[in-house]
Amino acid sequence: MTTFTALRPVLWTENIDETIGFYTRILGFTLMGRNDDWQWASIRKDDIQIMLSQPNAHEKKEGIGFTGSFYFNVDNVDDLWEDLKTKAEICYEIETFDWDMREFAVYDNNGYILQFGQPVDNIGNTE
């Protein structure tokens, strides 16, 4: 049986410089690699890796689009909210939901929804 070891989404963007800027300056990612000929880049923050790319000729031509959101599990959602609430466009404000997750969401520069959440039972733990 094959073991899946990681998921590294490729986010399409029409402006790779602007997208690299959003993820590095606003969210604190690090640029790991870039190829301007391919209009491709790789970014990382902690255990999260994302690739950025301008769509190729064989990929979707109707523009940038995604029918979901990206959900990040974080270890201090309240501090992250305080940091991001004035830096990014808010999708929904921080809230504790019935499913015992405290979370919020912002839009990146491409309109992708980025959700950030922490289980309620992990809030205040100082491990």
Image: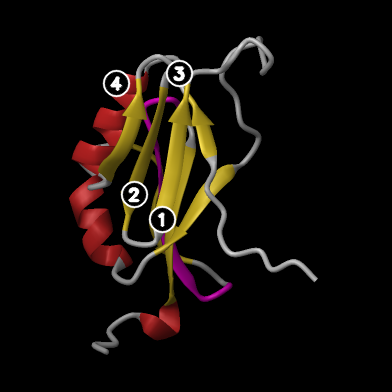
- Identified at 58% across, 15% down, the residue is 56
Q: Amino acid at mark 1?
A: Ile
Q: Is residue 110 magenta?
A: yes
- Identified at 50% across, 54% down, the residue is 71
Given this view, does label 4 or label 3 mark the residue nearer the observer?
3
The reply to whether the C-beta atoms of the residues labelled 1 and 3 are less than 8 Å apart is no
Q: N-terminal of the two: label 4 or label 3?
A: 4
Quickly name the residue at label 1: 48
Quickly name the residue at label 3: 38
Q: N-terminal of the two: label 4 or label 1?
A: 4
The image position of residue 72, as x and y in percent, is: 45, 57
Could you say whether the residue bearing mark 3 is in a helix, strand or loop? Answer: loop
Disc 2 to disc 4, how far (Cα)?
16 Å
Quickly name the residue at label 4: 17
Rendered position, 117 above or below 109: below
User: Residue 24: which numbered mark, if any?
Assistant: none
Q: Amino acid at mark 4?
A: Asp
Q: Amino acid at mark 2?
A: Arg
Magenta residues, as a range? 99-111
Q: N-terminal of the two: label 3 or label 2?
A: 3
Could you say whether the residue bearing mark 4 is in a helix, strand or loop? Answer: helix
Disc 1 to disc 2, how far (Cα)?
6 Å
Disc 4 to disc 1, how far (Cα)?
20 Å
The image position of residue 44, as x and y in percent, is: 34, 49
Q: Amino acid at mark 3?
A: Trp
- Identified at 27% across, 89% down, the residue is 127
Relative horizontal placement of residue 125, taking residue 83 as reference (left or right): right
Q: Residues within 10 Å of mark 4 (few under 14, many from 20)?
A: few
Any part of residue 83 in sight: yes
The reply to whether the C-beta atoms of the residues labelled 2 and 4 are less than 8 Å apart is no
